[in-house]
Every structure is written in structure tokens, then in C-alpha cells.
Image (cartoon, rainbow, N blue to C red):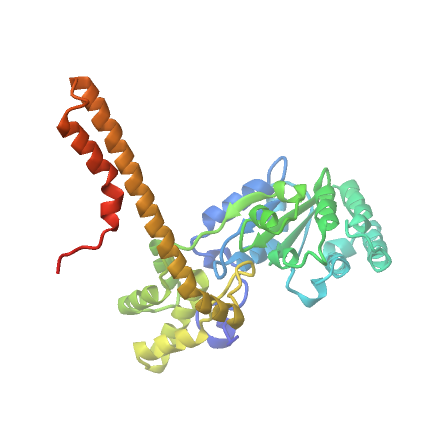
């Protein structure tokens, strides 16, 4: 990943790292308000923030990880302690590793260090993790009891949650059922980020657990044109109208504009202006930094599968052609039967059932499918 922060390059555009400043989360006020309505209310609820890659899920999680405690305090909701982790982190590849990581992060929070009784329970839980082979998170229950006694809440922001769901051999049914139990009547709240709605994903992966039903769904969409233009017009950008139009062309997708790609395009254009480079130079730099992202649940077929598909294309096409011809013959027969019925009904209605004209029409209808198969004599 190339240097991307404004601190290292002087650019007002930032990518490759989460953004915590709400002013820089352009076009995300509605999404933030939606998540806040679930978290900071009389009966808080866990949230699943889902959306495609490069839309800013990690930045939104980072925003809540750094701001949730302050927001709760401003709304007189008591003391909140917030931790965050990505399921892609090497230390979180197993259930025990995941539990160990979130407990270590909790113990490292200054507010926990300032409360000896809670800190002691967290330390005990950390010692228990390595001895506990259960996946249900039962080692965390004493910690939640201590937090409830103090009147505190614990918010965990989990990024890249599909990474756990892609490894059911490590994160089995007991893990999800256990965490469903942990969130019931406890001070524990979750904000889970994933590329797809985890409830739909769980059905595809055949992971049946009530855990996925308790997550309130918040869908993160691409930016619209107005929001994209606002992002490119951030303070210090100094991009011309032609620069902005170019960036919008480079980034535009049918669904809208991905914020991360806009940040990359803006950074390349900003640099080209500073260094006296051309628009084409900026475009090439943008293309060099852009890599396609595939959903873990939708892998691209390997070369072997592609070769098999190519070999099967011709017989498959021939088979489809035969089926199409058969369907056409069936359709012709259906039409002929319908014509016979209509002619018979008409003949009965006018009392001319046995007339030569009616009999001739019926015979023509019967011969219709055969005539469709006869080769044409036209040259």
C-alpha cells in the first residue's frame, strides 16, 4: 500500500487507513445516525453494517471505536468502554485467539485500569481462555457481570466478520450461539461489519444460529454524484472542474462512487497539480494504485475450472439448441390443437361441423407441425 495519509504526503485525501474524523466521512451522516439510533437508545441493539468493499465500513467502525464513549457520555448513558478488532488479524484466526485478543484490548483501556475489580475479572478471564476448549465465550461471562454491576457498557466493533464465517472449522455453531447468549440481558453490544448481510451469508454457509437474527441491519451504499463532488471539494484539495470531472469518470460504477477510489483519484490529481504533471499521468497513477476486490463468498474460478467450462461449451450449446427445437415443435403442436378446438367450436356454433370447408381447416391444423419441419424450396 503506498503512503496515503495527509501527514505523510500533505494531501487532503486519505486512503489505505480508517478515517475517524466525522467531517471527512462525506455522505455518511445518515448511516452514522442510523447506527446511533440502534446503539444510543433506551434498549440498545447490536448492529450489522454491511456493504461492498471500499465503501468505508472500516472507517465507520473506527469512528465509533473512538467516539462511542464520548457520545454515550454526552447523552447521559453512563460509562462505555469500546474495543475493536478485525477478524482478518492473524491473532484472531481461532476462537481462543479471538477471545484472548478482545480481552487483552479490554484490559488495556484506561477506564478498566482505573477500576481494580473489573480489571481483576478481565485478568482471570484471560488466564481462563487458554485452558478453556469451549467456543461459547463462557469465560467472558464473569467480566460482563462485573461491568453490569458497575453500570458500564462494553461495545465491541468487529471488522471483516465474513472472515470468521468463511472458516466454520474454527468458528462453529457453538461460537455464534454462545455470543447470542452473551448479548442477552448483558452490557455487551456489537457493531459487526461485513461485505454482505450476515444473515443471508449464514444461510448460504448453513450456519443456523439465532445470533444473526439479533443484529439490526444497516446497509452502506456507494456515494451519489453530489456526495462524490463534495468529497473531491474537501478543504485544501484545489482541484479544477476538469480534475473533478475526470475523477468522477474514473470511479463511476453503476451503483455510484466508492469513497476509497475517490480518495485515490483525488490524491493523484492533487499530486499532478503540485508537480506540474498531466491529467493522463494522474490517471495512470490512479490505475496503478487500484486493485479489483473480490468477495470471499464469490471466488473467481480457477484455471482448471475455466478449461473444463471451455471444453464443455460446444456440447452444452448443441444440447441447448436441440432443446430449443424441441420446444418449438411442442409449441407448434399446442397451436395446432388450439386451432382444431376453435374451428370445431365455431363449426358447431354455426351448424357447419361436417362442411368441406371446416374439415379442410381441421386437416390443415393437424398438418401444421409437419409443415414446419419440411425444408424450404425457396432459393
In x, y percent, where is residue 186?
A: 73, 41
Residue at position x 67%, y 59% in the image:
167
The residue lying toward the viewer, choosing from 306 and 292, is: 306
Q: Is residue 227 visible?
A: no
The residue lying toward the viewer, choosing from 343 and 300, is: 343
Residue at position x 77%, y 49% in the image:
136
Residue at position x 75%, y 48% in the image:
174
Rendered view: 52 above or below 207: below
Q: Toward which corner of the image does residue 230 lie, by quadrant?
A: bottom left
The residue lying toward the viewer, choosing from 176 and 257, is: 176
Rendered view: 192 above or below 210: below
In x, y percent, where is residue 31?
A: 49, 48
Rendered view: 314 above or below 196: below
The residue lying toward the viewer, choosing from 211 and 330, is: 330
Question: In the image, 217: left or right of 130?
Answer: left
In x, y percent, where is residue 239?
A: 33, 69
Q: Is residue 132 visible?
A: yes
Rendered view: 212 above or below 297: above
Q: Toward which corner of the image does residue 181 lie, by quadrant?
A: top right
In x, y percent, where is residue 131?
A: 87, 58
Numbered marks: total: 0
Quadrant for the C terminus in the image: bottom left
Question: In the image, 240: left or right of 188?
Answer: left
Amino acid at each position: 500500500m503506498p503512503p496515503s495519509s495527509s501527514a505523510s504526503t500533505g494531501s487532503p485525501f486519505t486512503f489505505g487507513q480508517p478515517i475517524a474524523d466525522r467531517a471527512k466521512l462525506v455522505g455518511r451522516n445518515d448511516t452514522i445516525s442510523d447506527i446511533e439510533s440502534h446503539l444510543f437508545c433506551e434498549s440498545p441493539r447490536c448492529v450489522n453494517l454491511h456493504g461492498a468493499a471500499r465503501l468505508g465500513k472500516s472507517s465507520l467502525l473506527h469512528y465509533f471505536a473512538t467516539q462511542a464513549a464520548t457520545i454515550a457520555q454526552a447523552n447521559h448513558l453512563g460509562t462505555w468502554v469500546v474495543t475493536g478488532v478485525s477478524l482478518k488479524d492473524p491473532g484472531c484466526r481461532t476462537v481462543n485467539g479471538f477471545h484472548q485478543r478482545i480481552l487483552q484490548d479490554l484490559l488495556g483501556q484506561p477506564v478498566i485500569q482505573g477500576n481494580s475489580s473489573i480489571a481483576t475479572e478481565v485478568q482471570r478471564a484471560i488466564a481462563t481462555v487458554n485452558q478453556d476448549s469451549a467456543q461459547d465465550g463462557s469465560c467472558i461471562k464473569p467480566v460482563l457481570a462485573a461491568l453490569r454491576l458497575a453500570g458500564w457498557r462494553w461495545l465491541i466493533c468487529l471488522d471483516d466478520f465474513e472472515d470468521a464465517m468463511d472458516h466454520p472449522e474454527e468458528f462453529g455453531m457453538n461460537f455464534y450461539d454462545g455470543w447470542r447468549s452473551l448479548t442477552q440481558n448483558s452490557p455487551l453490544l456489537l457493531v459487526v461489519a461485513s461485505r454482505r448481510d450476515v444473515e443471508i451469508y449464514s444461510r448460504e454457509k448453513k450456519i443456523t444460529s439465532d445470533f444473526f437474527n439479533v443484529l439490526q441491519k444497516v446497509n452502506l451504499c456507494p456515494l451519489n454524484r453530489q456526495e462524490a463532488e463534495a468529497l473531491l471539494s474537501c478543504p485544501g484539495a484545489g482541484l479544477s472542474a476538469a480534475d473533478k470531472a475526470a475523477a468522477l469518470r474514473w470511479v463511476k460504477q453503476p451503483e455510484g462512487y466508492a469513497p476509497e477510489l475517490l480518495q485515490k483519484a483525488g490524491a493523484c490529481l492533487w499530486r499532478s497539480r503540485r508537480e506540474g504533471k498531466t491529467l493522463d499521468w494522474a490517471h495512470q497513477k490512479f490505475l496503478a494504485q487500484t486493485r479489483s476486490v473480490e468477495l470471499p463468498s464469490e471466488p473467481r474460478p480457477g484455471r482448471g475450472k475455466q478449461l473444463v467450462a471451455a471444453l464443455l461449451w460446444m456440447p452444452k450449446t448443441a444440447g441447448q439448441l436441440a432443446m430449443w427445437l424441441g420446444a418449438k415443435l411442442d409449441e407448434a403442436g399446442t397451436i395446432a390443437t388450439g386451432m382444431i378446438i376453435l374451428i370445431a367450436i365455431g363449426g358447431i356454433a354455426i351448424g357447419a361441423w361436417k362442411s368441406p370447408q371446416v374439415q379442410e381447416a381441421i386437416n390443415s391444423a393437424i398438418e401444421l407441425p409437419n409443415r414446419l419441419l419440411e425444408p424450404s424450396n425457396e432459393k
